[in-house]
Amino acid sequence: MQKKSIFSRFLYSQKAAPYVFVLPFVLTFLIFFAYPVINTIMMSFQKVAGGEATFAGVSNYHTLMNPVFYKCLKNSAFYTVISCALMIPIPMVLAAMLNSKAMRAKGFFRSIMFIPALTSVVVAGVVFRLMFGELEGSFMNQVLAFFGQDPLVWLRKPVTVWITLFILCLWRWTGVNMMYYLSGLQQIPEDLYESADIDGANSLQKFRFITLPLLKPTTVYVLTISIFGGMAMFTESYLLFNGNKSPNNVGTTIVGYLYRMGMEQNNIGIGCAIGVVLLLIVMVINVIQLAFNGTFKKGE
Amino acid sequence: MKRKVISILLCMTMVTSMLIGCGKSAPADDSSKSDGGTEQSSDGMTQGKNTFVDGGTELSLWTFQELHVAFYTEMADLWNKENPDKPINLTVTTGESHSLHSKLLVACQAGEGTPDMADIEVGYYGAFLKDDYLLPLNDVVEPYEDEIVMSRVEMYGKDDNWYGIDFHLGASVCYYNMDIMNEAGVDPADIVTWDDYFKAGEQVLEKTGKPMCAVETADLFLPQMMLLEKGVQYVDDKGQPNIDTKEHAEAIEYIRKMIDAGICEVAPGGGFHMEEWYGHLNGGGVASLAMPLWYMGRFTDYCPDLKGKMGIYEIPVWNEGDTREVLQGGTGTSVIKYTEQEDLAKEFLAFAKLSEEGNKYEWDVLGFDPIRTSLWDDPEITNDPDNKFLQYFTTNPFDIIKKNGTDLTAPNISGGYSAAYSVLVTTTYVNAFEASPDEDAAELLKNEQASIIYE
């Protein structure tokens, strides 16, 4: 028998095939993820200027110990905590309502809730900036006037800034999280509810003892992406304040600060250091959170 | 056999689909001929071209201001007419200011993908100057040296080299709403010092109930003007950020005093380039505004109701006899060091920005006060009845420019200016005028100085 060429042996090899099939993903991962991460960590110890990089020890991290960075950290943490607190219960309840048999016009509400997620954040940010303008004629101030309130300077005072940011966040992401919960709800077997009915459980008890526990995988997933999304929030704050300039840094996030340092002020080294700190924070939070939720336990 | 063919096909599909992502799509418009005009490019940026000629050298330029596109392309056509031996085919790309500056900075850091020339706004300029991304323009500026206001060129420089040329002189003036002034019985021509201005402000407030002026929290024009009058900069001689100065504290205290007296307000929107502010200004909500002359264009564009009501006068100063003009704001156009057409780009730039033709265009169309002194005495320019800016205002801005001559103070934007600017417009003035108006100004500036990151 004629010996097959290396190429065809490779092509029919049972051992090589799996590697060939995962190769695209591995390559994308290495080129677009692993390489930049490693390079970022390296650059965070360098002073990068004029296309040249010189080793600078931990001076970039030392520079980061300043009140503005702490403030941005605090802003991002606050945003993450509150947005998780809002973005899990509200979509869950809405999804449960949409999933209920008693609900009318489900398709209509489902689309309505999801439409904001399809708009570009850029457009939404600009529209929100105009809606929350400080003149009497702006949309939100007209709403206030309808209730007999005085107009507010929305985007220059801390409390109203956060209200605006959370309204934007809710408006935009509720539909997405609701979709996750809807798909989670539809996987819960109907017979569980039926047997609960036989046992005489009311709807609140059914929600508490059947829906909530069985939605846990979905909740873990939503929580993970919400934590990451919250810590990495940038576009909303960038657009709401017309280019990363929130007054007194009320709405400047870690990524906003990274952008300001790295891109606007040409301190790429410091920018990389901020990126590394952000990566560490997000990783630690998520590992704790996943461990807490039992993701690493075997046999589940 | 069939299986082999299918598997090879599948592999090929996989490989090509991966490569598509990496490949650069060929430019749709590859023709060397163009009739000029603008077009939309794939990434949302607009492009403008001059009338391309055969054998012309390709040059590219980035600007953040759409109005500048026509200026450059028209200048390129004029250049080709006057220099048939070295014609250029100029492509001007424009996009949103913030993202364009970031793109330019990233391209400079990478050393690839930069245009030959670029407009760089004064607040961003220091970041480009710091790492030597720009080429000195001394040899092309020197022939014009006696005909222009040099402090405007010198400000875009370091170590006796000049790197950028501006569109305009950027002389600061005071715009008065004459309806309000007349109602209050104040003649702006009588206001010389800040104390006069203060007193006039009290009178305006009493008679009309309107504030005399406004201060920005998201920009720095009023405090910077007060500082430049005192000859003080935001950076020291070595380019280190230095906002913690006695004079700066004095300027802040003075503005606070005006706010407390009700004759100064925080500008709606926080800045003089905000939608809210334009509406407020156009509605006659404020009696006066101290800004550079290039702000005339904002009046003609955004404040149609004030036409024929605004007078331009000299700015108030600290002491009688001080020069009543400083230079503020601006955009330096520079040649990026990665260009392959260094000499041609520099020559064209100087021609566009410093020649008589270029300055005439800038004044007529863009409303920029000319950097060339020869135009100040040209009655065809200064008394042009068709000029929309001269028609709009009740007084002639050239009177102020001529009176104050060419020895003018410009901002020092070298070294840490960008870093200082960023802190000033995000925290310092918000704290000073809005968030903590009672904090001692010197103490506040000390804290603000400590938060500037520059190395």
Image: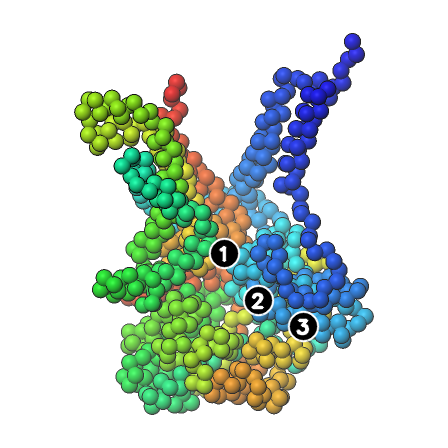
Which chain is indicated by disc 1? B
Q: How many marks?
A: 3
Neighbourhood count class around disc 2 (C-alpha, 10 Å): few under 14, some 14–19, many 20 upward: some
Amino acid type of the residue tagged 2 in the rendering: Glu
The amino acid on which the numbered mark 1 sits, given as a three-letter code, is Tyr
The residue carrying mark 3 is B74
Asked if A239 appears above or below A12 in the picture, the reply is: below
Q: Closer to the camera, A17 or B334?
A: A17
Q: Chain of mark 3?
A: B
For badge 3, the amino acid type reads Glu
Q: Secondary structure at mark 3?
A: helix
Q: Position of residue B411 (x, y in %)?
A: 52, 71
Tag on residue B66?
2
Return the residue at label 1.
B454
Q: Circle 3: is it few (<14), some (14-19), or many (20+) Cα within 10 Å?
A: many
Do we see residue B158 in this rendering?
A: no
Secondary structure type for disc 1: loop
Up-down relation of residue A190 to residue B422 (above or below): above
Task: Look at discs 1 and 3 and give the one toward the viewer.
Answer: 3
* First reached walking from the N terminus: tag 1 or tag 2: 2
Going from N to C along the chain, the mark reached first, 3 or 2, is 2
Quadrant of the drawing holding the N terminus of chain B: top right
Given residues B45 and A268, the one toward you in this image is B45
The span from disc 1 to disc 3 (Cα, nearest Å) is 40 Å
Q: The residue marked by circle 2 belongs to what chain?
A: B
Residue at x 23%, y 62% (from the top left corner): A147
